[in-house]
């Protein structure tokens, strides 16, 4: 019962940071494995989506930031990089301004439930998701979309 198999295989799924390349990840794997007998074969590859421009001088980012501020007035708006290679990659030819946003308050509890067992959000977070997207659409419909002024005074 102590038979060593003649071969073994493993499948590894990497999410590559936009600042890294496939070649860098493969080289890192080679160094970590440190065994010349191991062959590395790329089965499928999607390049990471580029980091979209951000800052108060970028109207698309500012539109999102001002919409967030309408729902979470005391929030601090800061860009972050997501390693998720979502469906966003299908839109990179359409715009340089592609943003992933989760308009909710992330706490250790809410963050732990994302894509986990019994994934859920509170009713309040769900309502704020809806309020955010309504605000975003209404703000985007303004001639000066993206500025920090609030154009709509309807209850969201």
Image (cartoon, grey):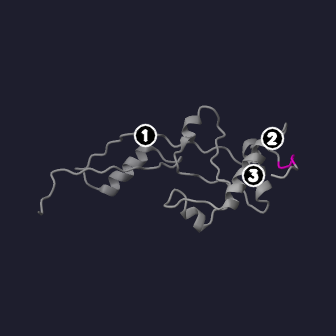
Pair 1/3: label in front: 3
**Among the 4 quarters of the image, the one containing residue 73:** bottom right
Quarter placement of the N terminus = bottom left
Q: Earlier in the sequence, mark 2 or mark 3?
A: 3
The region drawn magenta spans 148-152
**In the depicted structure, whether residue 60 falls above or below residue 35:** above
Q: Which mark is residue 131?
A: 3
Q: Which mark is residue 85?
A: none
Packing grade of label 1 (10 A; few <14, some 14-19, many >=20) is few
Residue drawn at point x = 64 percent, y = 45 percent: 99
Question: In x, y percent, where is residue 24?
Answer: 42, 47
Residue drawn at point x = 76 percent, y = 59 percent: 72
Inter-mark Cα distance, 1 to 3: 36 Å
Residue sitting farthest toward the bottom: 108
- Dominant SS type (magenta): loop
Pair 2/3: label in front: 3
Q: Which residue is mark 1?
A: 45
Q: Nearer the viewer, residue 123 or 66?
A: 123
Could you tell me which secondary element the residue under label 3 belongs to? Answer: helix
Q: Nearer the viewer, residue 53 or 98?
A: 98
Q: Which residue is mark 2?
A: 145
Q: Are marks 2 and 1 in contact (CB under 8 Å)?
A: no
């Amino acid at each position: 019962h102590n038979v060593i198999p003649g071969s073994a295989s493993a499948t590894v799924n990497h999410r590559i940071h936009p600042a890294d390349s496939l070649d860098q990840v493969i080289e890192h794997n080679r160094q970590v494995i440190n065994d010349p007998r191991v062959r590395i074969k790329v089965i499928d590859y999607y390049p990471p989506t580029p980091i979209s421009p951000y800052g108060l001088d970028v109207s698309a980012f500012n539109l999102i930031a001002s919409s967030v501020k309408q729902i979470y007035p005391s929030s601090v708006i800061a860009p972050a990089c997501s390693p998720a290679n979502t469906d966003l990659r299908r839109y990179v030819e359409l715009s340089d301004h592609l943003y992933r946003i989760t308009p909710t308050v992330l706490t250790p509890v809410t963050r732990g439930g994302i894509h986990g067992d019994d994934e859920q959000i509170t009713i309040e977070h769900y309502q704020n998701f809806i309020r955010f997207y309504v605000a975003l659409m209404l703000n985007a419909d303004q001639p000066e979309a993206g500025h920090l002024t609030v154009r709509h005074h309807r209850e969201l």
